[in-house]
Every structure is written in structure tokens, then in C-alpha cells.
Image (cartoon, rainbow, N blue to C red):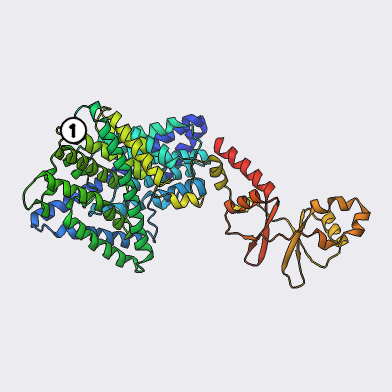
Amino acid sequence: MNYFQRHKAVIRYINQHLTRNQFLVLSGILVGLSAGTAAIILKTAVHHINTLVTEQLNFFNYPYLNLFLPLTGLLLTVWVVKVFLKGKDGKGIAPILQDISQRSGVVPKYKMYSQIIASTLTIGFGGSAGLESPIAVTGAAVGSNYARTYRLSYRERVLLLACGSSAGIAAVFNAPITGLMFSLEILLVGVVFSDFIPLIISAVTGALLSKIILNNDILFEFEALREFNHQNVPLYILLGILSGLVSIYYVRMAKKVDFFFHNYIKWNSYSKALLGGLILALLCFLFPPLFGEGYQSIKYLASNTPQEILKGTFFNFSGYNQWTIIAFSGLIILTKTFATSITLSSGGSGGNFAPSLFTGAFLGFFFAVCLDQFGLKNLPLGNFTLVGMCGILSGVMYAPLTGIFLIAEITGGYELIIPLMIVSTSSYLIAKFFEPYSMDLKSLIKEKKVFSENYDDNILSLIKIHEITNRNFEVMEGDCSLADILHQFRKSDADIIAIYDQEHTYRGFITFDRVRKILLNPELQENITARELILSNEIKLNLKSSVVEIIDIFDKTNIQLIPIFDGEDLEGFASRTMLLAAYRNKLKLTIS
């Protein structure tokens, strides 16, 4: 028995001797440790790759060689995904939400490592994306597969999936409440949930692990903020509205770039990576802060040293002045969404969490500096920079509480809680007004592939077509007599007979309910022909039809059965009665 088998045996033994809640608490700690470790490995690997690359470039004095590093990272990512991961990169939060709603919380095992490898190459070499989404995916896969290993229920599996993501996000920022809110706002939308203790423990475990292992150079922290001035409330409201509008711009431009790469460029994956890498090289040449995650640029802005981000750019040719930094910041806001979308659409791995923080930081700084130039002096530039981060994160990710607590935790207190709440809420409401669903979920929610805020729809989305299809039926020809049909029902336990003509073409069906009265009434048997009993509605569906489509038909008609075909072959009949029974079973599953 090897180490891992002994490890599993010990945990199974513990599971047998603990109550459910006690074992879930222990599981939260173990999943938190595993997901937190994965997050730390990813964050540390990317940091050291960036440091190594920077040192080598400075040593060999090749100042523009770094422009082609994102291209190298994209090509390496595509190669690794195709060769070693067999085309399965598993990127994005949306597939995890599909795993929760469509696959009972079962996340494929390869996602425990695929995102660590792919995003390390993409972002480590300067791809303009964020590590938070890959970390959340990795943590979710760790939690889900832990639950599968120890044969936990659907509800417990989803809980530990969320524990893994919470621990990963908490470890990245050393922010346990942020990790908790991330899961509640993004992963567990529409899920009836009451087991908060394991989730909290996982987030705390991940954050504590991060605090012990990671140094301050890697952690994202800020100090020396100015006190909140209530006289600036109108300005924060304006920043919130502007954040919402910029969030809509960010989302729509990202969708257009993604649509362009997937629908207009019919090249192979290496050619797309080459094109994306060259475009990134041009963008990074013009705007160096677009290189990588960009957290160092955020620190420059928050510490009121914006001249640092102008070094090595054409905007620094005439020296530093306010209008130069305003123009530069404004262009960064407009181009960041392109850089991130190109990185992801051309084969890179990463997410929009960090880019939204980056865009928000430049927006808050841009807003404050513009006001300063127009006569509103002595504004707290650092405060506006951090609050802007919260605004764009809320508007892009639709996670206002995550944004509020992230900034509160990384600044070490709640001095900015009021402006954070103002900007976050304003941005979220503006974005929600124009785009009811977040950028990753819009199409999936319309197709009922992920959970929404409508709990009934979520329960129905768990039902599969095979669960409501009655396959117990008999087959007879259309010229059969009524006596033959009655005889068939008497000798069979099926309550449906499918009727075919002599060319073996489906013509309809007869149910036992339609002949029930005839069985006991000889007079009716003499007056009614078999053809009069056939139900031949024009509605025919196939195995690829969605349960949502079936429900819609049941809602609009009085029919009880819908024929389901596999090509030309009749597979069975979708049953209204079986649908209601399946709904009750799923309801019990989600609340037990």
C-alpha cells in the first residue's frame, strides 16, 4: 500500500467515526491546505519567472526583447495544451458553473493541474491576464475530486468545490473574507446553501498558508491611505457611474475580440497564438504596463508615483506632467480589455479578475487626476485608485461584495468601506441595467446550462431527458383491431402503445387511459375503432432536445406525453408525470 492509499484509508476511517458536520470541517481544512498550496505554487512560479526574465533582460541589455515574451508564452501554452493536456486546458469559471449545474458538481481531474501549467506559461511570460480564475478552477477541481474520492453527496461535493476556490482566492490575496465572498457571489449563485463553517475554515486556511509562506513582494498589499472625507461622496458616486459604464465597455469589447478570433480567423491554434503574440508585442511596446498582471503598476498609482509607469515609453519624451499621465492612463483603460481578450482568445490561459482590478485602478487614478486639473485640489489619489479597482471588479465580475472586502482586506482595514460600498453598488447597478448577466454566463444562462438566481429553473436544469422518458411501451401496426389493442394492454405492463403503419412509419400512440372505459363497456367496443384512439400530436423531439424545451411544451399544452426519437427510431415518451417526480427528487437532493 503506497502513501496515497494509506492516506485515503486513514481519512475513510476518520469519516466513519465522525459526524457529518465534523468530517466536513476536517475536509474544509484539508481542501483549504491543498487548494492554498496550489495557489501559492502558481503565484510563486509566475513571480519567479517574471523576476528571472527581468533580470536577464537587464543583464544582457536587450530592452525590447521582453515584447516578444508574451508571444513565447502563448506558443508554449498552446503546445503544452495540445501535446501534454490533449487539448484540455479547462480554463474559465463558466465551465465550473456548468459542472455544478449539469454534472452534479463533478469537476474533471485534469483541472487540478492543467490551469497551473497553462497559466504559469501564459502569464509568467507576460500575457495580459490574471491568475485568479485559474486558481479558482484549480481549487474547485481539488474540492470536487476530494468529495468524489470519499463518496460524498452532491450537496457536500458542491460545498467542497466552493471551499477549494475560496481557499485559492484567499491565498492569493491573503484575504479570507474575499475568498468566501467570491464563492458565494460567483460559484454558488442559485444554490441553496447553509454549511458556511467549512467554507469559512477553508478560506482561513488558505489565507493563513499564504501569510506564512509568501513574502510581501508577492502579496498584494497597500498602506498609508488617507482618511475618508464625506465631502467627496458626490465624487465617489460619479466614479461609480463611470465604473459601470467602463465595465460595459470592457465586457462588450472583450466579447467582440473573442468573437473575431473564433469566427473570422480560421487558422490553426499555433497561427492564432502567433497573431495574438504579435499584437500583444505592439501593445506592450506602446503601453508597457499591459505586460503581465500589472499589479506593480497599480502599486505605483496607489502610492502616487505615476511617473514610474511612464519610464521607457514614448509618453516620457518630454518629461513628466499631469496631462501626459492623464492621456496615458486613459489609453491604458481603453486598451487593457483588448490585451486581455487577445491573450485569452489566441490560446492563452488566465482570467479577467486581475485585468478588471488593473483597469479600475487606472480609471480611479485618471478620474482623480482629471478633477485635480480642473480645480479640485488635494484629492486622495490613492483612495480613488483603490476604490476604482472595486468599481470595475463589481461591474465586470458582478461580485460587489467580493470587490468591497478585497480592497478592505488588502488595505488592512475598513477606512474606505463607505466609498467602496458607494462605488461598488453604483457600478454593479449600471452594469446590471445594460447587461443582466455577467460576461461569462450570458449565453449559458439563456441556454439553462448554469444556475441563475431563479431557484425553480435551477432545479429543473438538473433534470436530464433520460430521467423523464418512459421507455416502457409496446409497438403495433395501424390496421390492428380494437380487440388486438385491448388484448395487448391486458397481457402487458406497458401503458403506452406506439402505432406504426405498414411502411413502419410512426403515426401516433394510444395510452391505457384512453381505453380504460372501453375495457368494461362492450357497447363502446362495438362503436369505436382503433384509429379513433390514436393520439397523433405533431410534436416530436429527439434525445438532444433540452428539458427546458420539453417543459415549455408541457406549459403551453395539455398533452401528457411527447414522443422522443433517436434519428428515425422511437426511444420513448417524455412524461409530464415523470417530470414532476424528477423535480421532487432533485428538490430533495439539493436541500437534504
- Asked if residue 211 can be seen in this view, the reply is no
> How many residues crowd around disc 1 within 10 Å: few (fewer than 14), some, or many (20 or more)?
some
* Residue under the point 26% across and 46% down: 359
Does residue 525 sit above or below 173 in this rendering?
below
Q: Position of residue 116 (x, y in %)?
A: 32, 50
- Disc 1 is placed on an element classified as loop
Indicate left or right for 510 with 441 as reference. Answer: right
Indicate left or right for 344 with 18 as reference. Answer: left
Q: Position of residue 403 (x, y in %)?
A: 32, 37
* Residue under the point 59% across and 39% down: 587
**Which quadrant: the N terminus?**
top left
Q: Position of residue 591 (x, y in %)?
A: 56, 35
Residue farthest along the front direction in this orientation: 374
* Residue under the point 32% across and 33% down: 422
* Residue under the point 62% across and 66% down: 567
Q: Nearer the viewer, residue 229 or 212?
A: 229
Identify the residue under disc 1. Answer: 380
Q: Amino acid at mark 1?
A: Pro
Residue farthest along the left direction in this orientation: 318
